Structure formats: structure tokens, C-alpha cells
Amino acid sequence: MYSIKNGKVQRTASIQTPKGWPEPHYNPTESNSKFELGKKLFYDPKLSRDGSISCANCHLSYTAFTHVDHAVSHGIEGKKGTRNSPVLINLAWNNSFHWDGGVNHLEMQMINPIQHPVEMDNSLENVIAYLNSNHEYKKLFYAAYSDSTANSKSMLQAFAYFTSQLISSNSKYDQYKNKELKFSKQEKNGMKLFKKNCNSCHTAPLFNSNLFANNGLSIDTNYNDVGRYAISKIGSDSLQFRVPTLRNIEHSYPYMHDGRFKKLRDVIDHYTNDIDLNGPYLSGELRKKIVLSDDEKKDLIAFLKTLTDKEFLYNKRFRPTR
Amino acid sequence: MKFVLILILLGATNTFAQKDVSISLDLSPKNSLAEELEIDVFKFYISSVSLQFEDGSSYQESNSYHLINKEDSNSQLILLSSVPNKPISQISFTLGTDSIANVSGAMDGDLDPILGMYWAWNSGYINFKLEGKKGAQAFEFHIGGYNGVQATAKTFSYSIDADQDIKINIDPLAFLNSIDLTTTHSLMIPGAEAVLLTDGYQNMISIE
């Protein structure tokens, strides 16, 4: 959307930065037609080689756009990946993508699942040819770009548009910060414990950091995933993974890059009990032992559940258009 | 086998003091080793093409990204349009893509990721692809990386005589001769090894 102001063409940004948040890294000009096109791509299994897998197979809207109950996701022909499918929340604030940060721009993310042999196992050529053979897509591309012919740039930008709009900013925590409701005593105590023990990496209001860290997990011998090191080739990046957002964490189980923990309690027990404080690559923030009583762990979990955003989880706008 | 980059200066015929300059590649066998060398894939980016004039001024091609492909003769012709009609003293170009191209999201034209010169898992362009067989030794080199110590784009400048056609040879055999293929014959990720391989670019490019 554009408007004219003082003789100059002004663009309307699609993302209005929530109060107290930093500016997003990616903020395309508002376009309902790009949203609809991107959404159709997101829910279309025909993007996969055999027409069986859409993005939504591993990124379900009701579960914060991840794949609950799956440590790692199943792609084409039931083939299994090696990492837990990440939530798609507030991606416009991320400056890199994937657990190892290998993807440097939201628009380039989509190429990965399309091409990955255990995800959609397709090629960009095939996908673009399919889009250009489909009457519905021709209409959607025309609406979005005044050009019914799809190319990879227009497809990638429309897709990034849709995923950039998956914004969660109305959790119970946000409503508390906006003084719309009060926290229970337990939630308040949990928030205090969170600020002391967790917030330096999972920093409010996004509850992440665009950084990679080793949080003391032992290497998974099934996958031998070295994380960030595979991208940076810097030795000290060994076994480092993205610091993910904790928003909607209640609904995005299982946890960690390989989905090894089923419950929030397992995660907290890892941080209090299982970390080798002398591990060579351990994040500096974790070198001091975290001590929490059983009650404190319950309080912390109560706080983490305030990060659930029902408006986000049940947003009809994110569901397929009928 | 040789790969020749020819800069053809089309004589100035208009009154606007501008001319078109075309750069073309001639891909043809070079020497007796040619029969032992089999090139299956040879694709690379030439970017940031600029010309320097004898009067000290210069011309920089805008949006200057060219994917050169052995299999596509059209790709072997680069047309520089509206070049000031002045004697040219030097040509500069980058073998590879600059970091801007690598970090700016979806691109089209010669930078379209559909062209097989893009790594999705570790975002960035493959600047240089050479696959084939030398004698009995198969090789495949995909050289890329743009970030800091992983950067593989290299810029070259060559003096040229004004008003004369220029030939730039890009000879993959010279590149391969800079490598011990028995130990190094396959590389498809960014990093220190890729950067080391770009040392062979210098040998590969020559002015006739």
C-alpha cells in the first residue's frame, strides 16, 4: 500500500512495531495480495516432489507453527530429518534462520525445505513451472505483482511476506506488561526467577537473542550435529545452536534442536542438573550453576506459560483460505 | 582448451559521445593437453565490471552481475552500454559476487537462485563451478563464500590499449594446474580451503 504525502510516495510498512519492541529487521510494504499468495504457497503440498508435503506439515499454526510430538520431523516418503522443526514466530526480528543460522535472509529460507532431500525434495525449476501452469496462482501473482508469471524472486518474496506476518505479541505476559491484567503470585515469582536465570539469553520482549550458544547439551550420537560450527568453521562455535524464542513455548514441545526433551520440566532439570560447568564450549552465562527448588521450578513454568498467545495460535488469518 | 574473454570496442558512431562495449567469451581448446581435459561444468560470476579511461575518469557498469556458462553462448557476451567515448586504459572486474548480492534476499536475472549457483543451507552464491576430469582424475570445485575470512570474490585489473580489441583468456587448465588434484579434487563448501583455491584464479586469467 502506498500513499502520497507532501508530494512523496510513502509506503505503509506491513509490521507495526509493538510497544517496547525493537524495530524488525524485515518489514515489507503492506500487501494483502502477497499475504494471500504466500499463504497459499505455505499450505500447498504440490510444492513437494510427490505432492505430499506442504510447509504446514511440519509447521502447524495451532502449535506455534512447529510439529508437536515429533523430536525431528518427517518429510517426503516419511523420511526423517535431523533437527526439531522450529517455531515460526516473530521471524521478522531474526537476522538469521535455521538452528545453525546458515540462512541469512528470510526471503532465502524457503529454498531449503523445497530442495532438501528429506523434506520436499523438489527443485526451484519444478516449483516455478508448477506455479506458472496453475490458473489460481496466475491470478494471485497478478494481484500481487501485476504480472501473472511467477519467478523465484516473486515467489520467495511473497512467501517471506506471509511468514514475516506471523507475529505473536499478545500473550498473557504482554497483557500484563500493558496492565490489562495481573499476574498470580506464582507467575510473578516465576518472572523474577526468569529474569535472574534466563533473560540474559532469552531476552524479553522477544525472548530470544539473535545469537548461538552451547547450553550444555551432550552431542546427540544419532546425528552428531555440530551446529553453528558447520557454517562458521570457527572452533569455538562447536555445538552452538540458535537461542530460540520462548514465546508459546507451552505449545511447541518437544524442545531443543533435536527435540530431546518432551516437557518444560525436563528442560529446566537440564539447566539445573545436567550441565557440565567445565564443558569447553559452554556458554559463559551458564558457567554458574543454576539452583532452583522444586517449587521454584513450578513457578518458573507458570511464568513460561504466560508467554502463550492464544490470539496468535488461533488466528484464522493464518489458516488456509477456503 | 581455452576460455577467452574478448572485449570488443564498437567504434563510436553516434554524436552523443557514447559507445557500446561488448565483452565476449570464446570457449575453445587451447593446447595439446586439451584431449586429457574434460570439462563438464564451467560456470562463474563476473561482476563489478568497470573501465578506466586515459583521462583518469572511469565507467562502472550498474547492476553488474554476469553468470558466464560454458554451455550458454549468450552468457559469453556482456554488453556495456552508454560508455563514454574516450580512450580506455584499463578494465577491472571481480571474479565472484560481492557481499551485497549475498545478503540482500531474493534476486533475479543472473543472480536468480534457480540457476544452480546458490547455496540455500549456507546462504550465498557459488561464485565459481568447475567440474570434469583431468586424465583419470575427476574433480568438482564449487567455490563460494562472502563473509569476512570466507570471502572468495577477487578483483582483477588489466591495462589495455585503447581502441583495440582485448582478449582475456580464462583458462581452467591453468586453474587446475595450480592444484594437486590427487589430494584436492572436490570441494563444495565455503571456508578456508575455498579461499585457498581462489589463489589459482590469477593463473587462470591472462591478457593476450
Image (cartoon, coloured by chain):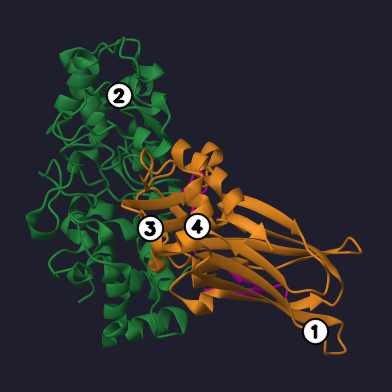
Chain colours: A green, B orange
**Of tags 3 and 2, which is closer to the observer?**
3
Foreground label between 3 and 4: 4
How busy is the neighbourhood of tag 3: few (under 14 within 10 Å), some, or many (20 plus)?
A: some
Rendered image: mark on residue B131: 3
Residue B54 appears at what percent x and percent y? Answer: 89, 64
Disc 2 marks a residue whose amino acid type is Asn
Q: Which residue does the numbered mark 2 point to in the structure image?
A: A215
| Tag 3 and tag 1 share a subunit | yes
Would you say residue A211 sits in the magenta stretch?
Answer: no
> Which amino acid is tagged 3?
Glu
- Mark 3 and mark 4 lie on one chain; the one further toward the N terminus is 3
- On screen, residue B137 above or below B80: above
From the viewer's perspective, tell me whether residue B95 is left or right of residue A46. Answer: right
> At x 59% / y 68%, what residue is drawn?
B4
Residue A147: x and y, percent? 44, 85
Magenta part of the chain: A1-28
Secondary structure under badge 3? strand
- Local secondary structure at mark 2: loop
Residue A194 vertical placement versus A227 (above, below): above
